[in-house]
Amino acid sequence: MPLVVSGPGHYYAGNFDIPATGTWVIKYTVRVDAINEQVVTTELPVH
């Protein structure tokens, strides 16, 4: 899904339809420097 920068540290995806219902798991991987990264997951219930 393409993201658009909407401000410093803020992004959005416009006109994006989620194709299936259920509980989606979203995983974010953020590189904090040249070697280290942080991984965060969250659940998104889709009805």
Image: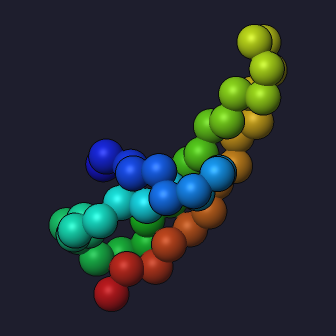
In the picture, the quarter occupied by the C terminus is bottom left
Q: How many marks?
A: 0
21 vs 8, nearest the viewer: 8
Tell me the residue at 75%/12% (across/down): 34
For residue 33, side relative to residue 17 (left or right)? right
Q: x, y percentage for residue 42?
A: 62, 62
Instruction: Tell me where residue 8 appears, x and y as whole percent.
Output: 64, 51
33, above or below 30, in the image = above
Q: Residue at x 29, y 65 (%)?
A: 14
Spot the residue most to the front: 7
* Residue at the outermost top position: 34
| Residue 26 visible in the shown view | no
Q: Quadrant of residue 7?
A: bottom right
Task: Examine the rendered structure and indicate whether residue 25 appears above or below residue 15.
Answer: above
Q: Residue at x 79, y 20 (%)?
A: 33
Rendered residue at 62%/37% (across/down): 29
Residue 40 visible:
yes
Image x and y of residue 26, in percent: 51, 56
Q: Position of residue 4 (x, y in %)?
A: 39, 51
Instruction: Say if 2 sits above or below 18 in the image.
Output: above
- Colour treatment of the image: rainbow
Taking depth in this image into account, of 39 and 8 the one nearest to the observer is 8
Name the side, left or right, on which 47 lies relative to 9: left
